[in-house]
């Protein structure tokens, strides 16, 4: 079904403020979820609102938010998120990276004691909007085994990258380091289809094309085997290891509801204006884009895309039409509405 | 066959100095090729010596080498390699990144007008040896189409990452962004085997599992489709686009022998000592390593590896026994020996 983005957003903001979050922070978290739903990344959209609320109620996510600068030296900084909402910590981390980049050309900011921060693209795009290159990584709870392993040791840690362009949308990549998200494996199972080799392994760590074997105690596999595993390890080094926060097997699951998570972020900003004229950079990006988009296509292919282009197309379309939402997600939001006493009415635009 | 590393190395150094390279630079290029062969990355070992020599003779690779700093601002620098050997430019680029990192915590150095620099791991490891994190990217000539494309638009641009450890070898990842190297596809063809889906497409850009279809005008595919393509685009942005050197379709092939290449590199160094105590960092890395290595194994798996571990094991073994070399590669070196009048004798240790 298609729901009214403005009404869901207002409900989200009011839910967070009711729980003690400032209006500004409630807006930050809400905007990030809305952006995810607009871009079709529903796994990071309002689907997450109930779990965030649950964790706030348990004091696993701290309200009101508090983010402090623990250490700052030349072009590097370490922030402490004090277990605040990941989106609030993430935003302040990229703001710090950009501040350092303005002074030093390049700036690196990391944050510890944070939580799930939504889509990594959001923070990379903050940099692109300021004519900077943005690079963003986060660790997450372990989901994947080592190559040949049969036990979760590393997250499918997201990596995002954004660049401004001369005109139109930025170029942006936002990828998780698992070959496929869990959702796609659930979908294959629902359709009674096999999954491609390499998407996952069974509970013993052995390759399988049966989605049920992956879902029944098995594991997601990293993109391209050792390459994706290696990238995930380095994202872990740049986040949990560098900041001294939790990493690998020491990060508890978000859905366990037993204790605080302590997620870390790594953000890098490169101030392009200190390196190259805006006109030159814009022209080069335009040439690269035309090389890609105007290259020969395979039969039946209508268009070739730069990273992020499809998501911006979806965002424009969904801003007009509303956002797609599964019925069960909406039911959870109604339940939340009752629980919190925050009004949520007449949100369905199209069944 | 197994050949004598010291004799091949001496031959390599003497060949380069005979062509006008300084002893120091000849040693830099030679060491990088030797390291590749030791680590089992033979595609970047002495197999490349004949093509490097050919390109030096055509003045496509400039000797003597010259590397200048074109621009330096705070924590960022742009070097001009003046078409010198990529290994010489690469080394100076990482040295500059580390110098900037010493002053600013983090340092970024890029280089334009360079050439093929061998294994990216070499430069990342230079940082790890100085207790820094090293991140290295390079662009290369286009080898892969866009997703759905049927024309080469982007290189399988290498990305490397290295971290020091408390004891023993650094952790190091060095990956190309194609799903499989060309060599593996040639090997499958020679064995009359199919290749897995996703390794390549035919000349029309359509998926195939027939190695011959990939080799006959077809193309390598990026790791994990749009993810690998996106990473390759961003490596291109950080190298050719940022430096104003050639990029994408404007980079000629190394083997065409028609004109100079103009490869670019991107290197980042993060000075750990300014961020975290060496003891703490070392302990955290040790914990991460033990989480991985001591996790549950799949049946039949003897060991689980951290990134780079297998290559260091090979390096130690090959330093004892000598380096593996295909007969045809050795024949080319003998031919080069005749051409240049540089002695190469009794190098075969084991047939």
Image (cartoon, coloured by chain):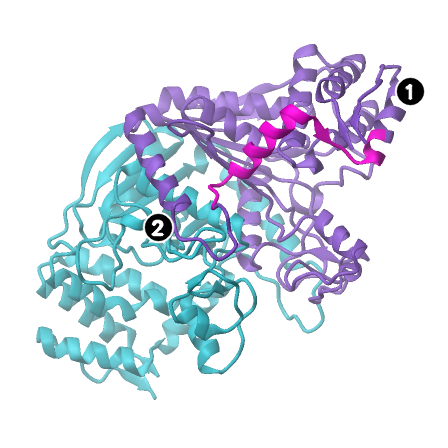
Chain colours: A cyan, B purple
- How far across and how far down the image is residue A264, in percent? 29, 46
Task: Give the residue drawn at x 73%, y 63%.
Answer: B194
Q: Which mark is residue B338?
A: 1
Residue A131 in view (yes/no):
no
Identify the main secondary structure in magenta: helix
Residue A192 or B76: which is nearer the viewer? A192
Query: In terms of image quadrants, where is residue B56?
Result: top right
Q: Position of residue A288 (x, y in %)?
A: 61, 49
Write down the quadrant of residue A2 in the picture: bottom left
Mark 1 surroundings within 10 Å by alpha-carbon count, few (fewer than 14), some (14 through 19), many (20 or more): few
Q: Position of residue B211 (x, y in %)?
A: 76, 59
Q: Nearer the viewer, residue B6 or A111?
A: B6
Q: Chain of mark 1?
A: B
Would residue A260 be found to the left or right of residue A315 on screen? left
Quarter of the picture holding the N terminus of chain A: bottom left
Q: Circle 2 — which element?
A: helix
Q: Is residue A305 above or below residue A321?
A: above
Q: Is residue A43 visible?
A: yes
User: What is the crowding at mark 2: few (fewer than 14 residues within 10 Å), some, or many (at least 20)?
Assistant: many
Query: Left or right of B114: which side holds B301?
Result: left
Per the rendered image, the range of residues in magenta is B304-330
Residue receiving disc 2: A123
Instruction: Write down the chain letter for disc 2.
Output: A
Residue lying at 51% horizontally and 28% vertically, measured from the top left = B125
User: With respect to residue A46, does A29 lie above or below?
Assistant: above
Residue contact between numbered discs 2 and 1, judged by CB atoms under 8 Å: no
In the picture, the quarter occupied by the C terminus of chain A is bottom left
Based on the picture, tell me whether residue A284 belongs to the magenta stretch: no
């Amino acid at each position: 079904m298609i729901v009214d983005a403005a009404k869901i957003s207002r409900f989200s903001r009011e839910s967070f403020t009711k729980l003690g979050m400032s209006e500004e922070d409630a807006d930050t978290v809400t905007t990030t979820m809305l952006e995810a739903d607009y871009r079709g990344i529903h796994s990071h959209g309002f689907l997450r609102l109930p779990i965030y609320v649950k964790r706030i109620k348990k004091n696993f996510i701290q309200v009101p938010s508090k983010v402090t600068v623990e250490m700052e030296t030349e072009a590097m900084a370490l922030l402490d998120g004090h277990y605040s909402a990941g989106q609030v910590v993430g935003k302040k981390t990229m703001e710090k990276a950009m501040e350092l980049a303005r002074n030093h050309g390049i700036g690196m900011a990391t944050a510890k004691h944070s939580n799930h921060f939504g889509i990594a693209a959001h923070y990379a795009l903050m940099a692109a909007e300021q004519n900077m290159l943005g690079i963003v990584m986060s660790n997450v709870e372990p989901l994947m085994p080592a190559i040949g392993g049969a036990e979760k040791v590393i997250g499918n840690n997201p990596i995002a990258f954004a660049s401004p362009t001369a005109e139109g949308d930025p170029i942006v990549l936002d990828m998780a380091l698992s070959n496929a998200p869990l959702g796609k494996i659930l979908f294959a199972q629902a359709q009674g289809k096999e999954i491609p080799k390499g998407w996952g392994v069974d509970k013993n760590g052995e390759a399988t094309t049966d989605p049920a074997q992956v879902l029944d105690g098995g594991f997601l596999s990293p993109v391209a085997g050792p390459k994706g595993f290696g990238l995930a390890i380095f994202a872990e080094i740049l986040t949990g290891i560098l900041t001294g926060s939790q990493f690998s097997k020491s990060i508890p699951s978000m859905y366990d509801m037993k204790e605080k998570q302590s997620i870390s972020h790594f953000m890098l900003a490169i101030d392009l204006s200190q390196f190259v004229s805006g006109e030159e950079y814009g022209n080069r990006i335009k040439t690269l884009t035309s090389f890609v988009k105007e290259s020969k296509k395979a039969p039946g292919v209508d268009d070739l895309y730069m990273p992020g282009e499809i998501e911006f197309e979806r965002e424009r379309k969904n801003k007009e039409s509303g956002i797609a939402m599964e019925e069960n997600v909406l039911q959870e939001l109604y339940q939340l509405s009752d629980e919190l006493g925050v009004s949520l009415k007449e949100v369905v635009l199209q069944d």
